[in-house]
Amino acid sequence: MSAVLKANERTGTQRSTLRKLRQEGNIPAVVYGRTTDSKSIYVDSIEFVKTIRENGRNGVISLDVGGSQHNVMLTDYQEDHIKNEILHADFLVVDKSSKVHASVRVNLVGDAAGVKDGGVLQQPIHEVNITSTPGNIPESIDVDITNLQVNENLTLADIKTGNYEINDDENTVVVSILPPKVEEEINSGEEQEPGEPENEEGRETEASEE
């Protein structure tokens, strides 16, 4: 059963209207779809955050707009990182039997053997683009790196897919273990001249004749 999020229609698009909605604890949003006319709405910010946390970033939500419910997915949102608040959200009406595109987080699992040997873990990408039906989109894609050794890597081709297809290039490196960093020996470039040291204080000398 999809999580339910209540929404209300809005008419104003002026900055002052949007600012007032946010001050009242709401998030301006839009809902749209292939067979659904685009509609300007707003949702309660606390309920929005709660729904996304419980249902997942790519989960299907039952959006209740004035008593009319739509199965939707959150496709995009704008965030003010300074104020730590959501400024705007986009909801796409989906058919649970039709495939959609989504971005999914890559989650590394385990402690790589190469890191234990002193190697340096490098993760070039943190998200991948996939295609799947809405109900089969994973919250994250787990990649086991336990057996990964120094100078080895894993690409998208190494990931076992489930009920979804990865759209990105299969040769894209997901994670690699670089060799340990070796400190270079500092060489001053000067050569030591042979001979006895100038200061021989403390060195033994032959006894003088009586």
Image (cartoon, rainbow, N blue to C red):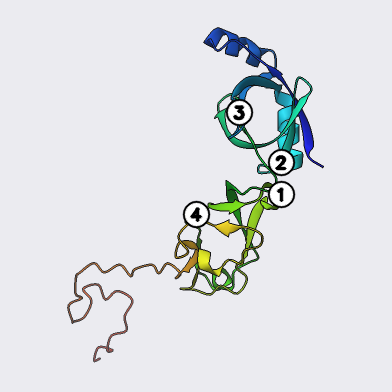
Which tag is nearer the camera, tag 1 or tag 4? 1
Which tag is nearer the camera, tag 2 or tag 3? 2
Percent across and percent down for residue 6 are 76, 25
Q: In this view, does 80 lie to the left or right of 187?
A: right
Q: Which mark is residue 135?
A: 1
C-alpha span from label 3 to label 1: 21 Å
C-alpha span from label 1 to label 2: 7 Å
What residue is disc 4 on?
125
204 over 164 or under it: above or below: below
What residue is disc 3 on?
89
- Marks 1 & 2, CB-CB < 8 Å contact: yes
Query: How busy is the neighbourhood of tag 1: few (under 14 within 10 Å), some, or many (20 plus)?
Result: some
Which tag is nearer the camera, tag 4 or tag 2? 2
Q: Where does the N terminus fall, quadrant-wise? A: top right
- Mark closer to the chain start, 4 or 2: 2
- Mark closer to the chain start, 3 or 1: 3
Between 128 and 100, the one lying in front of the other is: 100
Residue at 51%, 56% (x, y): give it. 167
- Mark closer to the chain start, 3 or 4: 3
Percent across and percent down for residue 175 are 51, 63
Three-letter amino acid code at the position of disc 4 = Ile
Three-letter amino acid code at the position of disc 3 = Ala
- Mark closer to the chain start, 1 or 4: 4
SS category of the residue bearing label 3: strand
Three-letter amino acid code at the position of disc 2 = Val
Choose top left, top right, bottom left or bottom right for residue 2. top right
Three-letter amino acid code at the position of disc 1 = Gly
Residue at 53%, 11% (x, y): give it. 15
The single residue placed furthest to the top in the displayed view is 16
Query: How busy is the neighbourhood of tag 3: few (under 14 within 10 Å), some, or many (20 plus)?
Result: many
SS category of the residue bearing label 2: loop
Q: Residue 60 carries which label?
A: 2
